[in-house]
Image (tube, rainbow, N blue to C red):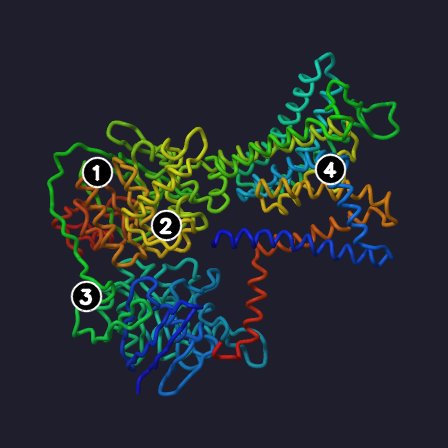
Amino acid sequence: MYAIETINLTKKFGDFVANDNISITVNKGEITAIVGENGAGKTTLMNMFFGLQRPTSGELIVDGKKVAFNSSLDAINCGLGMVHQHFKLVPSLTVYENIMLGAEITRKKSPLIDKKVEKKEVQKIIEEYKFELHADDVVENISIGAKQRVEILKMLYRNVDILIFDEPTAVLTPQEVDELLISFKELKNQGKTIILITHKLREVMEVSDQVIVIKRGRIIGSKATKDTDAKEIARMMVGREVVMNVNKEYKDSSKNKTAYSVKNISTKNNSGKKVIEDISFEIKEGEILGVAGVEGNGQSELVKVLSGLMVATEGEVYLYDKNITNKWPDELRSSGVGIVPEDRYAQGLCKDMTIYENMIAGYHSDDKVCKNGIMRRNEIEGLSDGLIEKYDIRVAEKNGNVSQLSGGNAQKIIVAREFDSNPNVLIVSQPTRGVDIGSIEFIHNKILELRNENKAILLVSSELTEIMNLSDRIIVMYKGRIAGEVDGKKATSAQLGLLMAGMAAD
Amino acid sequence: MKKNDTILKNIFNVVFPVACAFVLGGILIAAIGENPFLTYWVMIQKSLFSVDGLLKTLHFASPLILTGLAIAITFKANIFNMGVEGAAVLGGFFACVVGFTVKGLPTVLHIAVCLLTGIVVGMLFSLIPALLKAYFNVNEMVVTLMMNYVVVEIVKFLSQGVFKDPSSGYVSTYPILDSAMFKKIFNSDLTVFFFIALLVFAVMYVVFKKSKLGYEIKAIGKNPEFSEATGMRVKNKIIIIMLISGAIGGLAGSGFLMSEKYRFTMDFSGSPGLGWDGMLIALLGSHNPVGILIAAIFYAALKTGSEYIGVFTNVPKDIVGVIQGLLILLLSVKFLNERFRFSNKIRFLFKKSSKTDFNK
């Protein structure tokens, strides 16, 4: 008997077929990974499992019984629990209060909540699954990884046997990913069935027993993990051969001219705490400097200071001989600093504006697109059409809003805009977060192309493999300071990991 | 194609509440035993299809076009500027003061000086909430709303005191000099002020639709963080937008005074007031300049039409006030819907209750 079996499950939205005759089986007590690019239909399938959407046709069988869920409550009662990508927690409540929310334990014959018993119960399951958590902590103070564990416990407390994880590692730091993968194994040992939706192959290879690949709403293949490898899965997902490791030739750039130099900059956040302290580095022409680190160690603030969104309280930034400390973002761009911001939809794009309007943002004062304060519509459209072509951006409607685009294509708009403005220096932050494999490959190649055109590039990313694959030199940030510098050619993840954890490399 | 759909939807969103208001108003007219169709016909015919009436309508539309634009430019940038009324009153008052104190200027120069005074006063008035918003993050809605009351008390104090016309039986300033008055064109109600309003409309049309500033206003309204990150310097832009709004508001007030009222009284701006009418007009016109132009003329037609209703039918002219009230009510539903997506929530409710049919 399977934990979950589907027979010809189909979901249509109007004419669009999101899931087309899906027939899969999920074994009990195993970890099944469902992989596919963004928009392949993974989430729709899971939403049907969890009762958030109802199938157009087909059957869903859980534990040998045919079921039809009307809501997620039905699914939970059937033993299915889902851990969402975006957590649904109350920040001001404690861990145990969040877990008990909706299932409060009351004192006998009274409507009052018995907090003592609640806390004990929660502590019990925390220990049972060996989670690193304290029942007493307030949720807003705990790390993202811990929040995720609270979400998992919420489901475990409700006695579910099948856990569905929707992109669980998208928001986690490398260390937290490792911890989560350990938790997965622990859960499996306790006899739980896990369904993991992801497009990160490392996790798939590491923990799963079975891999199911979805593409354009159809099942492309289903394999036991031990019989396949990451390369094969990637090919199945994308439909063609994918270069997993970018072919990068090392060039000695140490004798090149220094294009960008940061000298002893520090800054404070709104509450007056020093978030970056005494950061100094130089980038030569034709060099990629990677900035690694566990998230929240000052990388975001560093990028903000360098891109004009935060003020440096001390220190200076130079572009060649020109002092560009604390310049406005428009001044930075016009003096030749391209910026790919960390948060795509907050700083990089405006979802509710058209693709054309987004294509010129930041460069909208250029004579090319704006004359005497009047926007030159034809030039803008011509320029944008060229970039859409050149950067292979898949657009349904050029006059439509950016919100219609997938994550990868949206990111390519930013990349096209910033890379094509012919900058001397590029500040690139999290260029491939939440982007599908095909686009990742494309963006990485573009970054290397620019390096070969002798541009200086600062690459900030929480994906360690990305940093290691692309960078010529790597600096690691820890608690707002530079913990160490490593040669990109010789760097190992163990070495970087130590620096990221704040331990000296020697 | 998709774009046409949204345009149609926008038009429907505006036409539907207007039609509803008229239907409800019609029921009221029928309830007092009069023929609603005849009443509406008189109203439309007299305010739009007769030369005198049309010119009068355009005359009354002039300040409304301006206040509508003044509201729209800030609302588009997601700045809830409630201070257009204050700017208009203050602009009108000081234009009036200049209009009767400065003597011996030729007409054109005197008019220009008065208008300029109104504009500058309106800008200064708007600068206060703008600076508070940009540099101290103070909610502009509260500040502008409160400042309107401050303005009322200030002009009341001044027109009861130093500037009071002793020959007038009520609180009023001296009338402005002849040289500061807009002259009637061919004995109709229309003055040059209407063409000034049209000129401002044309400029604002270009600003909204074609200019870099318009692009930035749109971006700031949709996503301020993105705007800052792409170098639009949001703080400065907020101040610029508020200054433009204040200038247009001040111009509306001073022009209205110099073309219609000629002296400042406490009920100068009317009820509900030029600025508030402007808010309704901006809403009716979906913050689109052309829409605002049409809405302002329509709204002014209601005003002129009301005067004729009293003369030609037995319906009291206050019925127009009722229709205006209904319009505000119905349009606020649309406004709330945009903010809180009521229609989606209602649709969701229906979906929930009909979920028993599985294979839908």
Q: What amino acid is at disc 2? A: Asp
What residue is shown with label 3? A230
Q: Secondary structure at mark 2?
A: loop
The reply, left or right, for residue B76 in relation to residue B278 is left
Of callouts 1 and 2, the N-terminal one? 2
Is residue A4 in sight in this rendering?
no
Q: Provide the chain ID for the residue under circle 3.
A: A
Give the CA distance from mark 1 to mark 2.
23 Å
Q: Earlier in the sequence, mark 1 or mark 3?
A: 3
When the figure is inspected, residue B95 is found, relative to residue A449, above or below; the finding is above
Q: Position of residue A360 (x, y in %)?
A: 38, 40
Residue to which mark 4 is pinned? B54
Lateral position of residue B194 relative to residue A88, left or right: right
Mark number for residue A455? 1
Point out residue A399 in the picture as x, y percentages from the top left corner.
Answer: 42, 49
Which labelled disc corresponds to residue A343? 2
Q: Can you say whether B153 is above or below B224 in the image?
A: above
Three-letter amino acid code at the position of disc 1: Lys
**B190 vs A164: above or below:** above
